[in-house]
Amino acid sequence: MLFKRFVALMVCEALAFLPATSARAQQAAQSSSPTAQATTLRQHLQKPYLDLFELSPMPSFSAAEIRAQRESLKKGEDFCVKGFKAKSKDYQKQIDAARQQLKKNTAKLSESERTRAHCNIQNLDLLQSEAGVLAGQAIPTAYDNLIAKLDLIERWPAVRKQIENELASGSHVNRHWGDVQDIGFREIAAGQQDDIKDGQKAVEEMKRLGLMPPQVEDRAIQDYVNSVAQNVARHSDLKVPLHVEVLQSREINAFALPGGYLFIERGLLEATDDESELAGVIAHEIAHDAARHGHKLMKRATIAGIFFQAAQVAAIVLTGGVAGIGTYYAIQYGFYGLGLVLNLKLLGVSRDYELEADQLGVQYAWSAGYDPSGFIRFFDKMATREGYINGVSWFRTHPPFYNRMEQSEREIMFLERKPSAVVVTSAFEQMKKALAPIAAKAEKEDANAPSLKITRAEGCEPPKKLEYKPGQPIEQLCSAASRTESPGAKPQP
């Protein structure tokens, strides 16, 4: 349906992009003025994390330049979010007025006039939803990513020197979980077998509530993903059997339920560019189970503990801070207009769980023979180059904090380099080829399937004036948001 395509279009592609550098900006970057240096710093924020880690020596920027850039980013985010919150309120006023007018004139309207009124309200609902997603998720995520990279530029040179000193002295082996030669024989958390029953119950409950997307009906794809996951599991600290399913969902995510139940969503397979990226994500989720993070979270919240405010669709508490598979419906069926409520603080989500899963996941991917930087590369791609609406829940549960990137790179540097580390395989390439027609068919079927979307009127043209265009830089987006402010308001950098 047009609605689904429109929702996907609204926030897709490059929210995390900064604008492509113009010829004038490139010339300015070559000069020695403070403004030119600031432009150069801003350009560095567009580089992938791994490129920044490998810059040696790291370009030197003064404390004043770093501070000015940090303040600029903060002002830019505040201004942009404020503008789209204002737009959301304005759309609500228009919706209320249109509904009052419809109610007032309902007996007088012809069928065509009523349809136009319905389409108008529907499109205003859509625009309000878009503004809410931009203000509440997409814009903050984009700026979080930029700030994380600014932190890296500021702090990494000193951290790298510290790591090199630890490597030279051999003290790095004394770090927490530094006994990597004993992977599989050490105990990360006792009682993993006790989680099997809880995991089984959670899976059954999800299916009973209709919250589990169907499996991808391709045995070769299921077998391939299972083979990668089992290989990682054999080289991990997981003590229970691993059950793997590939789900038919465009969402870019993966999640693990307690007791060795791992679910990979189709969108994740589409988003990965090589097998080491896939293995890195899988290793991260296996680490959550090895450390029993899901068990610890489920002590604080029940399976049906959070709801979609209007739709009252129960969500499922998953491991490692993943708030709920109900997010699948939010993405798949456009629940933004229904007031999605997922409060991670209520679930007792701990960043320490993510940091521990990052470290152990890097170790497990490395132990299984993969390039351990795959997880960082995937993370960076999601934060910098993708930004798709499909990835909203990824950032809700995997925010691009500097310390996560730093700790992952630190662990990689501490591990022995393996010249034959796997990056891509022919089996991965075959899986991608097999997946393409399946994904295309699923998207076509989704477009025509009944849904829980807020769409009510059929045959409506989407709004002619979109708030966001694919590939639009944040600065242009914020400039558009400024039109909701007073006439004298000016967008911040």
Image (cartoon, rainbow, N blue to C red):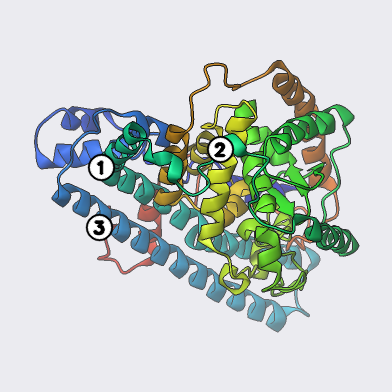
Q: Report crowding for label 2: few under 14, some 14 to 19, many 20 or more residues within 10 A (C-alpha).
A: some
Q: Amino acid at mark 2?
A: Val
- Image x and y of residue 51, in percent: 38, 30
Q: Residue furthest bottom?
A: 104
- Image x and y of residue 329, in percent: 74, 57
**How many marks overall?**
3
Q: Quadrant of residue 271?
A: top right
For residue 180, the mark is: 2
Residue at the (57%, 44%) spot, across then down: 360
Q: Amino acid at mark 3?
A: Glu
Task: Determine which residue is flagged by label 3.
Answer: 71
Between 318 and 431, the residue placed more toward the observer is 318
Q: Residue furthest left?
A: 33
Q: Quadrant of residue 311?
A: bottom right
Separation of residues labelled 2 and 3 (CA atoms): 41 Å
Mark toward the start of the polypeptide (2 vs 1): 1
Above or below: residue 197 compared with residue 433: below
For residue 158, the mark is: 1
Above or below: residue 86 compared with residue 193: below
* Image side of residue 296 versus residue 68, left or right: right
Q: Report crowding for label 1: few under 14, some 14 to 19, many 20 or more residues within 10 A (C-alpha).
A: few
Q: Nearer the viewer, mark 2 or mark 3?
A: 2
* Image side of residue 231 versus residue 150, left or right: right
Mark toward the start of the polypeptide (1 vs 3): 3
Between 381 and 296, the residue placed more toward the observer is 296
Q: Nearer the viewer, mark 1 or mark 3?
A: 1
Mark toward the start of the polypeptide (2 vs 3): 3
* Image side of residue 46 versus residue 244, left or right: left
* Image side of residue 309 versus residue 35, left or right: right
Q: Report crowding for label 3: few under 14, some 14 to 19, many 20 or more residues within 10 A (C-alpha).
A: few
As helix, strand or loop, the secondary structure at mark 3 comes to helix
Q: Quadrant of residue 337?
A: bottom right
